[in-house]
Amino acid sequence: METDWSKVMEVFTTGIIGVFVVMILLQILTQLSTRVIDFVENLGKGEGSSPEPKSPTAPSKD
Amino acid sequence: MPELLAPIAGNVWKVLVAVGDKVELDDELIILEALKMETPIYCDDGGTVSEVRVKEGDSVNEGDVLVVID
Amino acid sequence: MLDILKDLIYSSGAVSLTGGNLVMWLVSFVLLYLAIKKQYEPLLLLPIAFGILIVNLPLTFLMEPEHGLVWFFYHYGIELDIIPPLIFLGLGAMIDFGPLIANPKTLLLGAGAQAGLYVTFFAAVLFGFDLQEAASIAIIGGADGPTTIFLTSKLAPHLLGATAVSAYAYMALVPIIQPPMMKLLTTEHERKIVMGKLRPVSKLQRICFPIVTAMAIMLMVPTAAPLISMLMLGNLFKESGVVERLSKAASNELMNIVTIFLGLSVGATMTAGTFLSPKVLFIFFLGLFAFIVSTGAGLIMAKVMNLFLKDKINPLIGAAGVSAVPMAARCVHKVGSEANRRNYLLMHAMGPNVAGVIGTVVAAAILLKNLG
């Protein structure tokens, strides 16, 4: 049985890259939603008492 | 008056000290159980136990006061 | 009279016994011993061991297609991929994603450990397994039983017994396998790093996480859908707080019920004919290799992250990136507290630990997409 090494390399590289891409995106999404929820919950708590400019900073654009 | 805080959430498995006990640095004061694992909590500095805030079986959150030491 | 006796003997299974059957009995007895006496994953090893025993009693035809009792369990439960997602439903209802939400960086650690899985894939191909088989063996390094069964049943069903048993067995052996690797790859100083308190996670965040994650993963890797959808549904049951009955049913009754059929069916795939070949036995070796490499990959990933982080993480938690919830996290906690008795890493390690579950599913889904 011949091993198709190009397929092996393909599975190997797309696998590693794929997992990292998915997990990094997930990380960004989680951070983003955490920020949004923090912001919303702070708004609900007491407007004006501690405004704390929580404007989205670095990783907001994507 | 130093307080011994719970470093992790869990249930109090064993309380090894009582009010009035003299304790020293690194004594085991409380054993917490979290995720079916026993975690001993050590004394941060010596003194006399003035208050034990938990009893065996209590569930505690991270940061809760377990024991007060004078 | 004599004829009846003769007939009884010939129709009995005993005369059809092969040497292979006897060896499989032995395997079964060893697993029973490990399950009962040593309590290594008894919930699974016990039914698996009994499954092995009963299919190696000749002429019972329990695994006869379209005919045998256990075959129906196997066919409907595992071949049609029903049981692993149901286990994930229960798992989701038990998992606390809080530590992960509090520290999303740990998702990267969950990815890091999966890199080891691909190294094993490479190694298995080198040793002459075909690609589908190699992928099924590699996934053992993800240390997640249901995912291993899910992938193997699709790619290499003839290896199901071996990959499932080695995944569960090594998971139980985490406290023995992981610490040497942890100590090898980290310095005493690194192990002493104390991590700060985790930020509190609000209920809304806990509710949003399974929804957002399920959508994101299924949009990116649709092949992950059966496992991820059930995992996140279970978690939503738990975190929503409004369907306690469903959450309890998923994590207790349903989970227990399907575990019985899962274990029995997996054990029943191990007849002497399919199991006793050097190739299959080699899987146990490669599975161990997978476990060790994945642990190492997680540790290295944590060290790499430390190069960029202001607040250093304790690299030990990278080892929890293999799933094995919560054994790996416990193990990290233990090794960490050996280095510094005031180091309580348990909750910090739960982050990468549950991230590892997600990571393993994603890795399996990508393998399935490429090789299925």
Image: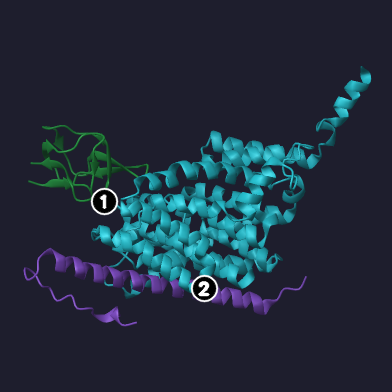
Chain colours: A purple, B green, C cyan
For the C terminus of chain C, which image quadrant?
A: bottom right
Query: Going by the image, does C18 lie left or right of C113?
Result: right
Residue C320 drawn above or below residue A29: above
Whether residue C62 is situated above or below residue C7 in the rendered picture: below
Closest to the observer, C218 or C35: C218
Q: Nearer the viewer, residue A22 or C333?
A: A22
Q: Is residue C184 visible?
A: no
Q: Which chain carries label 2?
A: A
- Circle 1 Cα neighbour tier, 10 Å, few/some/many (<14 / 14–19 / ≥20): some
- Mark 1: which secondary structure? loop
Residue at 50% over, 59% down: C227
Q: Which residue is drawn at 10% across and 72% down?
A: A51
Can residue C148 be seen by looking at this rendering? yes
Residue C196 at x, y percent in the picture: 24, 60
> For residue C142, which numbered disc appears in the image?
none
User: How many numbered dots are placed on residues in this image?
Assistant: 2
The front one of C267 and C114 is C267
Q: Looking at the image, which residue is at 50% across and 62% down?
A: C360
Residue hosting label 1 = C342
Pick whichever, C302 or C48, lies toward us.
C48
Quadrant showing the N terminus of chain C = top right
**Mark 2 and mark 1: Cα distance apart in space:** 36 Å
Q: Which residue lies furthest to the bottom in this view?
A: A61
Q: Is residue C366 left or right of residue B37?
A: right
Name the amino acid, label 1.
Arg
Residue at horizontal 51 percent and vertical 65 percent from the top:
C224
Query: Residue A15 occupies which quadrant of the picture?
Result: bottom right
* Number of other residues with Cα within 10 Å of mark 2, as a class: few under 14, some 14 to 19, many 20 or more: many
Residue C250 drawn above or below residue C355? above
Label 2 residue SS: helix
Which residue is labeled 2 in the image? A16
- Measured as percent of width and height from the top left, residue C87 is found at 50, 50
